[in-house]
Amino acid sequence: MVPWSTRLIYAAPALGLAALGIPLYVHLPKFTTDVVGVDVGLVGAALLLARVFDAVTDPLAGYLSDRTRTRWGRRRPFIALGGLVLALSLGVLFVPPTDGPFASGALAAWRFVGALLLVFAAWTAVVVPYEALGNELSEDFDERTAVLGLRDGALLVGTLVASAVPGLLAWGLDLPETNAGERTKFLWLAAIYGVLIAALCFVCAAFVPERGRAQGQGGFLSPAEALRTLRANPPFAALLASYTVNAIGSNLPATLLLYYVAVVLQAPHAEPFLLAYFLTGIALMPAWPPLSRKIGKKEAYVLACVVNIGAFVWAYNLGPGDSLWFGLICVASGVGFGGTVILPSSMQADVIDYDELLTGERREGHYVGLWNVSRKLAAALGVGVALPLMQLAGYVPGATTQPEAVAWTLRALYAAVPSVCALAALGIVWRYRLDRAAHDKILVALAARRRGESVADPLHPGVLLGPLPLAPLALEPGAAPR
């Protein structure tokens, strides 16, 4: 049983990490094109490059986290130090110079690329070990959903608060709607989120104990090893493929929201729509764990996706003056949002138990790295294509009136493409068949292999698994064997 104090302290860094996501993914692209003056196509290319870099560094972070041995554990040093570096790097990204060679032109674009790479490298150093730590806190099928659900609930709360912060800063500091006002706003965002992330990551690293685990002994994750992992673990392959296809589409609305609101709806502010979406998601978040216990994790996840698609697809038909309808769409799609956040995380942790049964190793970092590589490459593909397409459609940075082709491009990218991707993802996830009964059999078989017995593979009964080789657990100070 994971104590509530441990659950709360573990969930705390998610507040800051999620809060950072709003300015990073929603506000930064438009700030860079319309205030800093970097070409919209270059911003898209920079985001593509940064996210590909972010993705390919995830396996390295997972490899190092799985195999690190220190007196403080194998996850916690990365969380504490990475949080500090991430906090400092925000100042580099969010506070671009107003004069000098890096203030405009090609050098401003290159500076933007370098700052993005620094932020994403620090982000990976924190997030991969942080998620791996959460996956190993509990082996219980339903408690795991509750523990990770609390973390993902903190993600939603952080996102909700971050949705309101830019508007509150503008109001509280009486910032003008000018380039200077936007720069001041981003300066404050860097300071607020930097302090929050550094402090919460340190507290988590200091007070969340690591459990004794069979430590990973394999080599660095190569593409061939990644393919072997997918072949050996069909539930993970189905879950990963579904999540990746969905991520290609779901990352587009976050990047394009400000453009969609300004060009398609011709509304002055996007914050009310973000608040409507995330408030609904947070309010209904507690309903998803009990629903998943009743009907199954996969079935609850499918239901959440169907609700999202059924609501969000209507955004394609909106135009100027339809802000009220868009607000209702945000509320309706927020109903399913909590399920799409909580349930994949819990399902991912379950397939890691199956991997331990097959290999005898706890490789949370390995799996989190693979998961994040796919998610981030999908995001890179979506964003890297979206902004250049806007440029081809004729988008003019900072202009109050845009060509009609830009509006139709935004409608397609914002509503149609994500809906098609989500439908494809639903078809793939039906191949996932690791339910509660199968998970219980996996834990029983794992215990038997640890005792030196041979067992049948619960998911492939015709396959016999021999006894696990005896190996010492990597215990941290004060930790108890499991």
Image (cartoon, rainbow, N blue to C red):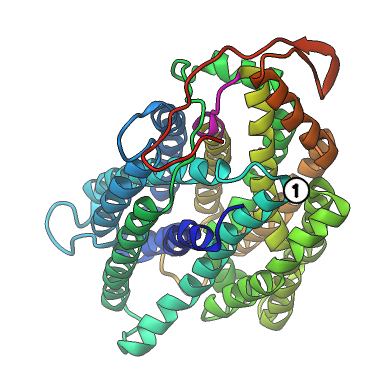
Which of the two residues, 399 or 452, is positioned nearer the viewer here? 452
Q: Quadrant of residue 66?
A: top left
Q: Is residue 413 above or below residue 64?
A: below
**Residue at horizontal 24 percent and vertical 51 percent from the top:** 108
- Find disc 1 in the rendering and name its residue: 422
Q: Give left or right: position of 390 versus 332.
A: left
**x%, y% of residue 25?**
47, 57
Say if 171 sits above or below 209 in the image.
below
Residue 364 highlighted magenta (yes or no): yes
Question: Residue 237, percent across and down?
Answer: 70, 28
What residue appears at the point 67 percent right and 69 percent down from the top-left corner? Answer: 281
Q: Does the segment drawn in magenta span residue 293?
A: no
The C terminus lies in quadrant: top right
Magenta span: 360-367
Give the x, y percent position of residue 340: 70, 55
Q: Residue furthest left?
A: 100
Counting other residues with Cα less than 10 Å from the Cα at mark 1, is it few (<14), some (14-19), or many (20 or more)?
many
Residue 460, visible in the rendered structure: yes
Residue 340 in the figure: left or right of residue 102: right
Percent position (x, y) of residue 334?
A: 70, 68
Where 39 falls versus 350 (above or below)?
Answer: below
Which residue is painted at 84% across and 49% down in the image?
Answer: 296
